[in-house]
Amino acid sequence: MSMPGLLRYGHALTGNPHDASDLVQSVLEKVGSRWVSVQRKGDDPLAYVRRAMANTHISIWRRRRRESLVAEFPETGAVPPELSRLDNEPLWQALRELPPRQRAVIVLRYYENLSEAEIANALGISCGTVKSQSSKAMASLRTRLGKD
């Protein structure tokens, strides 16, 4: 497997290296337990892992975005989280605001240099969906970055 590539993909999906490492580790644990069946199917194992990463990230994102009510307000003196060197980059901020599937398509297309067919295979979607998600994502990025 290509661990550095998976970590880069995870970082682009999650927005930070710590969550990316957790995502890669949890997906590789899941896939590792089914490795024989993955190889038997004859599919590209790396594409299978990328698809699992995208699906797992979307599931985590859906769980986290649910509102959680608290009895009291948090303390105002809380220590701010450490910022990544990319956190202040306009492109990175705009990419982070994209929906998970659009972000996955953009990262695989322009960061991992995969073709539309490879992206469709990796994410388990059609080539038409790859094209439409890419188009929507690029339009959104142009709008957000055009302001700056």
Image (tube, grey):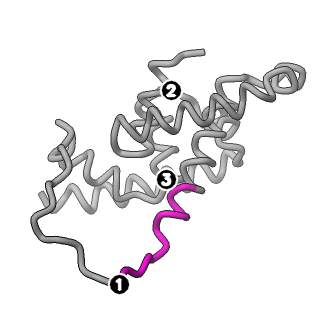
Q: Residues within 10 Å of mark 2 (few under 14, many from 20)?
A: many
Residue 37 versus residue 19 in the image, above or below: above
Residue nearest the observer in this picture, 76 or 92: 76
Place of residue 147 in the rendered image (x, y in percent of width and height, measured from the top left) = 15, 62
Horizontally, residue 26 falls left or right of residue 89, namely right
Q: Looking at the image, is mark 3 or mark 2 earlier in the sequence?
A: 2
- Helix, strand or loop under label 1: loop
In the rendered image, which residue does mark 1 sit on?
Answer: 71
**Mark carried by residue 102:** 3
Question: Is residue 16 in the magenta section?
Answer: no
Residue nearest the observer in this picture, 107 or 33: 33
Q: Looking at the image, is mark 3 or mark 1 earlier in the sequence?
A: 1
* In this rendering, the label closer to the viewer, 1 or 2: 1
Q: CA distance from mark 1 to mark 2?
A: 39 Å
Question: Which residue is most to the bottom?
Answer: 71
Query: Is the Cβ of the residue at disc 1 closer than 8 Å to that at disc 2?
Result: no
Residue for point 21% across, 55% down: 145
Residue for point 87% across, 26% down: 37
Residue for point 60% across, 56% down: 59
Magenta stretch? Answer: 60-71
In the rendered image, which residue does mark 2 sit on?
Answer: 6
Query: Is the Cβ of the residue at disc 3 closer than 8 Å to that at disc 2?
Result: no
The kind of residue on which mark 1 rests is Ala
Q: Quadrant of the C terminus?
A: bottom left
Q: CA distance from mark 3 to mark 1?
A: 35 Å
Place of residue 15 in the rendered image (x, y in percent of width and height, measured from the top left) = 35, 45
Residue nearest the observer in this picture, 13 or 81: 81
Q: Looking at the image, is mark 1 or mark 2 earlier in the sequence?
A: 2
Q: CA distance from mark 3 to mark 2?
A: 18 Å
The kind of residue on which mark 2 rests is Leu
